[in-house]
Amino acid sequence: MYRFHAVPRWVLDRDPRDKRAKQPAATDRLDPDVPQTPDAVDRALARAEYRGAFALEHIAELLNREKGPVMFASPPDDLPALLRTADQLLTLARQDAGEKARVWRCDCGTHYAVPVALIRPVAIQCERCGRTVDFEIGKSIGEQSLAELHQSHVNAYRRGIADFFREAMARGWPVLVSNE
C-alpha cells in the first residue's frame, strides 16, 4: 500500500545530524485525508496518469530505484502534471459514482437510500425500531450516490488524494510517496 505525504522543501534539505538545525513540527507535514482501505489505493490510481504514464507504474518505478519516501512530485516543475492527475482522479470518481439516490433517516438513526428513479411518496416501518419512516421529498436528509461499499471507498480515496495534491502544490511542498 502506498502512502503519500508532503513536507516543506527545507525539511528535505536539512541535515539530520545537525543538532542546531530547526526540527520539523507536526504542522510541517501534510497527510491526505483518505480512507485506509488496503487496496483502495491501487484501484483509485489504476487508471490515473502522471506525466504520460500510469501513476501506479511511475510510483513502482520510483520505489524500485530507492528505499523509503521518494519524491513523487515537486513544484513548480511538476505542478501542471500533478494538477492534471488530480483533475483526472476527480473525473474517475464522478464516472464511477453510481446511481443518485435520496436519503432518509429514522428517529433511531437507521438510514434508507432510494434511487431517484424509484422515488414516490410512501411510508415504511423501520426495520430496526419499527417506527414509521415517510419517504417524502421534503423530509429527505440529502442526496448521495449508490455504489458498492468498496467503490465508495475508492472514490473517497480519489477525492481525498486529489485535494491533497492540490493543497501540496498550492503550498509549494514536494509530495513524497512510500511503500508501507
Image (cartoon, rainbow, N blue to C red):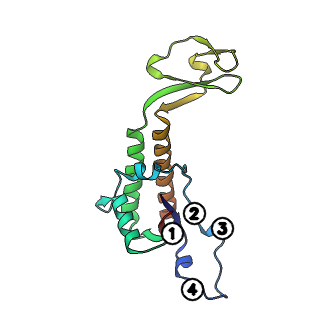
User: Residue 66 versus residue 53: which sits nearer the camera?
Assistant: 66
The circle drawn on residue 30 is: 2
Disc 2 vs disc 1: Cβ atoms closer than 8 Å?
A: yes
The circle drawn on residue 173 is: 1
Q: CA distance from mark 3 to mark 2?
A: 9 Å
Disc 2 vs disc 4: Cβ atoms closer than 8 Å?
A: no
The circle drawn on residue 15 is: 4
First along the sequence among labels 4 and 3: 4
Observer able to see residue 169: yes
Q: Secondary structure at mark 2?
A: loop
Query: Mark 4 is on which residue type?
Result: Asp
First along the sequence among labels 2 and 1: 2
Mark 3 = which residue? 26
Query: Mark 2 is on which residue type?
Result: Leu
First along the sequence among labels 1 and 3: 3
Query: Mark 1 is on which residue type?
Result: Trp
Residue 79 x/y as whole percent: 40, 65
Q: Secondary structure at mark 3?
A: helix
Residue 164 x/y as whole percent: 51, 57
